[in-house]
Amino acid sequence: MIIAMDSNAQAFPLPQDPTYMDFTSAGYSDVWSKLFPKRAGLTCCQDEADNNPASQLYQRIDLVLTHGDVTPWGAALLGADPRSRLADGLWPSDHAALVAGVVVGSN
């Protein structure tokens, strides 16, 4: 199983949201945490107008969770770097996009 979502359940920073902890307690694996255990992977939230000059991302709530025979092989954040701002200075979104690659049925 693969779930990709804007969960509104904080995975980082601590304290983690109870909903996130319910998923991990049920055996779901967080792709970002598995691949990058020491990196924050912040995905939320730019200013509502998306015109803030410096990134205001402060938490990780956009998640890719897996369960069962699914192996993560890569992940990246899009729209988190100031160089990703549009020509008019706006951020592409108030969230950074989390992109993940997984292999299903690898074991």
Image (spheres, rainbow, N blue to C red):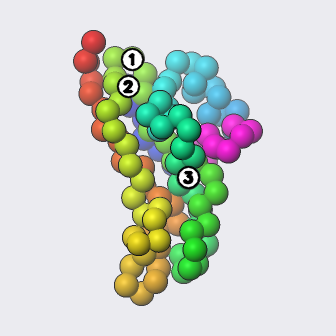
Q: Amino acid at mark 2?
A: Met
Q: Which residue is mark 1?
A: 68
What is the distance, in whole Å, between disc 3 and disc 1 at their CAs?
A: 26 Å
Residue that appears at 43% across and 34% down: 35
Work out whether residue 37 can be spotted.
yes
Task: Name the residue at the bottom extreme.
Answer: 88
Query: Mark 3 or mark 2: which is in front?
Result: 3
- Where residue 24 appears, as percent x and y from the top left, is 58, 25
Where, by quadrant of the figure, is residue 97 drawn? bottom left
Work out whether residue 65 can be spotted.
no
What is the distance, in whole Å, between disc 3 and disc 2 at their CAs?
A: 24 Å
Q: Which residue is mark 3?
A: 42
Q: Which residue is mark 2?
A: 1
Q: Is residue 56 left or right of residue 107?
A: right
Q: Which residues are magenta?
A: 7-16
Where, by quadrant of the figure, is residue 10 drawn? top right
- Where residue 42 appears, as percent x and y from the top left, is 56, 52
What is the distance, in whole Å, between disc 2 and disc 1 at their CAs?
A: 6 Å
Label 2 neighbourhood size at 10 Å, few (<14), some (14-19), many (20+)?
Answer: few
Q: Nearer the viewer, residue 21 or 78?
A: 78
Query: Mark 3 or mark 1: which is in front?
Result: 3
Callout 2 touching callout 1 (CB < 8 Å): yes
The secondary structure type at the circle numbered 3 is: loop
Q: Amino acid at mark 3?
A: Leu
Q: Nearer the viewer, residue 31 or 6?
A: 31
| Residue 66 is a magenta residue | no
